[in-house]
Structures are given as C-alpha cells and as structure tokens.
Image (cartoon, grey):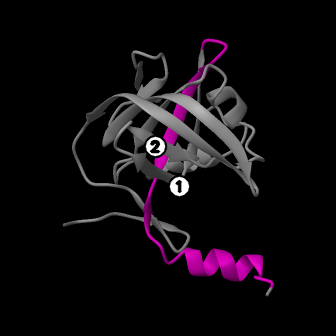
Amino acid sequence: MSIEEGEFRAVLGHFASGLVLVTGLHDGQPAGLTCQSFFSLSLDPPLVAVAPGRASTSWPGVSSTGNICVNVLASDQEALARTFAKSGAEKFAGVGWSPAANGAPRLSGALAWIDCTIQESREAGDHYLVVAQVEELETGSGQPLLFYRGGFGGFEA
C-alpha cells in the first residue's frame, strides 16, 4: 500500500505537539532551528531525541560542537518559532539568550531548557534521528506553544 504524502501529513497533523528551538554554537556564533519532532527517550540514563530534517541548512551548524540546548517554547513565542523555521534568516537578531554550561544558547522566556550532548545521529527517511544525553535542565514559567493541523495555538489546563 502506498501512502500519499499529503494524506500522511494531514492525518499526523491531528497529533498536537509542542515546539522546541534546538540551539548550538557554530564557529562561536549562535545557531538554531525550530523542531516539532522532540521527545523524552529514557529516564536512566536521561536521554531525549530530536528529528531535524535532512534538508535543514541550520542543523549542521547547530550540531557542530556536539552540544545542543532544547528550548521548549512558550505560548507567546510563535514569532520565534516562525523565524527559526526559515532557512538563512538572521535568527538571533534581537533575541535574548545566555550560554548554557555547554555553550549552547538558552533562549529568554522559554518554558524549559534541556542542555544536552549528542550521543548518536542516524539517517531516518528524510530526517535525522538524534539521541542526546541530558546534562542539565531547568524550567521557566508560562503556557506551552502547540502545533496542531498546520497552525499554532496554546493550552490551558
């Protein structure tokens, strides 16, 4: 059975997900990208996984040092999600951030910061599946930014 790409996207779009900005340093400069494919993988050891697209022009720079920060976006950070989803944009212009202990940028106003060391990366279809060891983590406050059926929204408990 062949599954049509548009149908696949439409059906999987019914799964609401959070959004993260995965950041790192490239030649001493901050680099980052928006990623919807992020999940907790293991408690012992603490591992997370992200799946950046293989066509991403940002991922090679973000991952170049082997250290990344997964910034969980807050409901008021839709503009950041859109900016970091673009290729070639000056993504960090006017964006507040501070370096994590591993050097990767922690974005101001995020709901959480998960500082990681990349353990493994492999090709998986048109994406990479990247497993990262959690080294440090911290939470902020607010509500999450969600992605659902091609659009952005929030959540209230």
* Magenta span contains residue 7: yes
Which image quarter holds the C terminus?
A: bottom left
For residue 107, above or below residue 1: above
For residue 146, above or below residue 111: below
Image x and y of residue 98, in percent: 40, 20
The residue positioned 45% from the left and 52% from the top of the image is: 39
Image x and y of residue 100, in percent: 40, 20
Image x and y of residue 85, in percent: 61, 48
* Magenta span contains residue 73: no
Q: Which label's residue is closer to the chain start, 2 or 1?
A: 1
Q: Are marks 2 and 1 in contact (CB under 8 Å)?
A: no
| Mark 2: secondary structure | strand
Give the residue pinned by disc 1: 36
Inspect this view and state whether residue 80 appears.
no
The residue positioned 73% from the left and 43% from the top of the image is: 56
In the current view of this chain or complex, which residue is farthest to the front? 44
| Amino acid carrying mark 1 in the image | Gln
Inspect this view and state whether residue 108 appears.
yes
Q: What range is drawn magenta here?
A: 2-28
Q: Residues within 10 Å of mark 1 (few under 14, many from 20)?
A: some
The residue positioned 75% from the left and 58% from the top of the image is: 125
Residue sitting nearer the eye, 125 or 109: 125
Q: Nearer the viewer, mark 2 or mark 1?
A: 2
| Mark 1: secondary structure | loop
Image x and y of residue 53, in percent: 70, 50
Give the residue pinned by disc 2: 48
Q: Residues within 10 Å of mark 2 (few under 14, many from 20)?
A: many
Residue 71 appears in which quarter of the rendering? top left
For residue 67, above or below residue 131: above
